Image: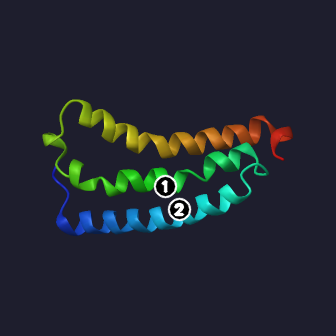
Amino acid sequence: MSPISQKTRDNIFRAGVALLIGGGALALWAYQDFDKLPNYLRIASLIPVMSSYAMLQVDQYRDWASVQGIDRVHAIGALLAPPLLLIGSLIWLFAAPDAHA
């Protein structure tokens, strides 16, 4: 696997910053009415912030061959968290339709 170029790194980092700002705004909005939101929306509101975390850590994982041990576990965990949150919120949406309110 080849290392990530500086241009790609910059694009990933900028997208991570944008996701963090947008996700923070979404989380702030969700927090205001957190008790009134259905559980699937509570979970889904965390997805942008969790996605931005992995993108902001791009410098640590640019050269995958140099990442060893527990750092690989952290990188894989950071990448798996957003899709798992999305799947969890979709399951909650479809499996418990009476719990939407």
Q: Nearer the viewer, residue 69 or 65?
A: 69
Residue type pointed to by label 1: Val
Colour treatment of the image = rainbow
Residue 40 occupies which quadrant of the picture? Answer: top right
Reading the chain from its start, which is encountered first: label 1 or label 2? Answer: 2
The percent position of residue 95, horizontal first and vertical second, equals: 76, 35
Kindly indicate whether the residue at mark 2 contacts the one at mark 1 (C-beta within 8 angstroms).
yes
| Residue under label 1 | 49
Q: CA distance from mark 1 to mark 2?
A: 7 Å
Q: Which residue is located at x 59 percent, y 41 percent?
A: 87
Q: Is residue 36 left or right of residue 75?
A: right
Residue 66 occupies which quadrant of the picture? Answer: top left
| Residue under label 2 | 24
Q: Which residue is located at x 86 percent, y 39 percent?
A: 98
Q: Which residue is located at x 16 percent, y 49 percent?
A: 63
Q: Is residue 1 left or right of residue 58?
A: left
As helix, strand or loop, the secondary structure at mark 2 comes to: helix
Seen from this angle, which residue lies furthest top?
A: 69
Q: Nearer the viewer, residue 59 or 90?
A: 59
Q: Give above or below for 67 relative to 48.
A: above
